[in-house]
Amino acid sequence: MTRPRTGLWLGAAVLAVLTAMAAFPGLFTSVDPDAADIDALLRPPGDGHWLGTDQNGRDLYARIVHGTRPSLLIGVGAVALALVGGTLVGVAAAQLGRFADQAIGRFLDVLLSVPGLLLVFLVVAVLGPGTGAATVGLAVGALPGFARVARAEVISLRGRAYVEAAYGFGWSRAQVVLRHVLPNALGPVLALATVSLGAMIVASSSLSFVGLGPQPPTAEWGAMLAGSRDFLALAWWPAAFPGAAITLAVLAITTVGRHLQRTVDGSTA
C-alpha cells in the first residue's frame, strides 16, 4: 500500500508555479516592480495592491513575482556549478591514480576547513558584490560535497563486471568513464543537488540580505527583507511576504528533493 503523496504533489505544483514566474513574470503581473509611488508608501494589502506596498510605494506582489528569477538564479547556478565541478573533480580523484587522489583530497580538505560564509566573503571581496560573485562563492563552498559523492560512486563502480568487460574489449579509460561510469554515478550526485538547492536558496537570500547579492533596485526576496527591516514597527507586510516566498520555495524544493533522494536510494516514497 503506497503512502499518500499530497506533500510531494503540492511541492511539485509550487515548483511549477515558481518556474513559470521566473520564466514569464509578465503572465502574472503587468505592474512595473520598480515603479515608486510616494502617495502609496507602506499601503496595507487590499484593493489595487494585493500584498500592499513597500517603503518606496512599490507594489509588493509585482516585486515578489519579478524577484523570483534572481532569487532562484543564484541558488540554481551555484548548485549547477558545484555539480559539474564536483563531479569532474571526483571522477579525476577516483580515476587518475593514488597521487592525484591524495592531492585532490587535500585540496578538498582545505576548502572544507574554511567556513562556508567566510569563503563566500572571500570570493565577493575579489569579484565584487553581485549575482555572479555570490553564485561562484556558494558553488566553491558546495563543491567538496559533490566531489566526495562522485568519487565514492566511481570507486564503487569501477570494479563492476561490465566495466572490466569494456576494458577487455579494448576501450580506453576515457570511453569507459564517459559511457559506463559517469552515467551510473550521476544518480546520487543529482539527488544531492536537489536536496542542496533549498539550502542554497536560503544562503543566497542571506547574502542578498547583507548586500552581497543582486544590487538595488533589483527585486530580490532577500534584498526585499533587508529593505523592510527598518519599518517593521510600522508595517509587517514588506517583510512577511518575501519571507513567506523564501520559505515556500525552500519547502517545495526540499520535499521534491527528498523524494528523489529516496527513489535513488531504492526506498519507497
Image: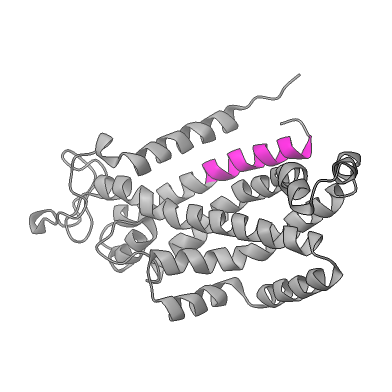
Q: Taking 15 as reference, is 198 above or below it?
A: below
Q: Magenta segment: does it hold 256? A: yes
Q: Taking 123 as reference, is 216 above or below it?
A: above
Residue 185 horizontal/vertical position (percent): 74, 46
Left or right of 123? Residue 239 is left
Name of the residue lying farthest toward the front: 170
Q: Nearer the viewer, residue 87 or 168?
A: 168
Left or right of 268? Residue 200 is left
Residue range of the region highlighted in magenta in the rendering: 251-266
Q: Magenta segment: does it hold 38? A: no
Residue 264 horizontal/vertical position (percent): 73, 38
Residue located 58% across and 27% down the image: 6
Residue located 62% across and 50% down the image: 193
Q: Nearer the viewer, residue 92 or 9?
A: 92
Q: Looking at the image, can residue 71 be seen?
A: yes
Name of the residue lying farthest toward the left: 39
Residue 194 horizontal/vertical position (percent): 60, 46
**Magenta stretch prevailing secondary structure:** helix
Q: Looking at the image, can residue 241 be seen?
A: no
Residue located 61% across and 63% down the image: 142
Residue located 24% across and 62% down the image: 217
Left or right of 258? Residue 96 is right
Q: Taking 27 as reference, is 70 above or below it?
A: below
- The number of callouts visible is 0
Q: Nearer the viewer, residue 37 or 162?
A: 162
